[in-house]
Structures are given as C-alpha cells and as structure tokens.
Amino acid sequence: MTDARIVRTRAALHSSITDLAAHKPVPTITVSELAVRAGINRVTFYKHYASPAEALIAALGSELDTAREHFVSDASDSAVSTVATTIRLVLDHVDRHRALYQLAINTPEDGVVPNLLADHFTGSLQQYLAEHPELTPPNPEVDVTIAVRFFAHGLVGAIKAWIQEGSTDRTAFIATVLSYSPEWMFPTDD
C-alpha cells in the first residue's frame, strides 16, 4: 500500500509539470520552479524524480497507460477496431494536453514528449505482439523490432501533423493511420 503523502506529492508534481510544460519548453523548466508550483521543496522532489522531464514522462505515461491497457487486453473487438479505439483514446489524451503537445513538438530542443510517445507506442506494440504470437510479418526477413519502432515513430509523426494542422477530426486521423498500418500487425476480419 502506497503512503497517502507519496500519492499526494506525485499528484501535485504531475499536475504542476503538465501545467508548466504547457507554457514553457520542458528543457527550460527548473526543479526549483516545479517544486514551488507543487508546494514541495527540492529535496522532496528528488525523492520522486531526477528531473522535470522524468516527472513529465511519469505524468503523461500514467495517462497513456489507459490506452495501452485497452489495446493489449481488448479481445472482444477485431484488431482494427481495437486499434481505432486505442488511437481515439490517445488523441483524447493529446487533446486534453494540446497546449503542452503543441509547444513540445514546435520546440526542436525538446525531445521529451515525442520520445515519450514513441517509447509508449513501441512498448504497447511489443506487448500486443507478445500476446498475439500468431501475428507475424509475411516476409521472414522483416525484423519485428525495427517494424514496431518504425510504426511507433510514424504514429508520433502523424500526431505531430494532426496537432500542427490544428485538427480535431479523429475520424480522418484514424482512417489515415489504419490505411497505412501493416495488415499482418492488425489483420481485418474478412
């Protein structure tokens, strides 16, 4: 059982870092300003995280985990339907933090958020494929690790385009992503 103080402190840090990252690039956020915003001191901050970037990864990652859980555990829908629902959950998350994502993708020196997304998608796809060993590429020379990373980074690029266009149209986004998704990874029910 986790101590209630730890839960409160992490919640304050997560709220504070997402607020700060919506207004200034992550590499410019200091531990001191994050600690003050969260109502804690620097020593307490370092008991939880090594840097503001690590705190942001934890905050956004915990939200994205909901989408991952749906993706890897939903056995009732077709793979394509599961992917579409999961993408919608991710886009809901991105929309809740649109200012943060907008700033992060337009700040060249800030790789925290794009790398977080790419690593999250990579981990989700790896877990999904581990739970579906029947899904294999049609060409035995395809390196699945590279294919997963390639697709994960492609999703990040698609989200970046979606944000930069100012789009909120999830249907078009999902249709576009699904049209370029590897069929061996997300087979249709024909």
Image (cartoon, helix red, strand yellow):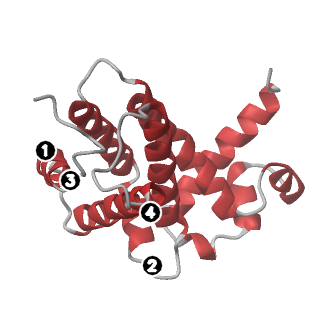
User: Closer to the N terminus: mark 1 or mark 3?
Assistant: 1
Spot the residue most to the front. 140
Residue type at mark 3 is Val
Along the line of sight, which residue is nearer the eye, 85 or 162? 85
Distance of mark 1 from mark 3, alpha carbons?
10 Å
Residue type at mark 2 is Thr
- Residue 28 location in percent, x, y? 62, 76
Q: Which residue is mark 1?
A: 171
- Residue 130 location in percent, x, y? 49, 37
Q: Is residue 162 above or below residue 7?
A: below
User: Closer to the N terminus: mark 4 or mark 2?
Assistant: 2
Q: Which residue is mark 4?
A: 146
Residue type at mark 1 is Thr
- Residue 72 location in percent, x, y? 43, 31
User: Closer to the N terminus: mark 1 or mark 2?
Assistant: 2
Q: Which mark is residue 177?
A: 3
Distance of mark 4 from mark 2, alpha carbons?
27 Å
Q: Which residue is mark 2?
A: 107
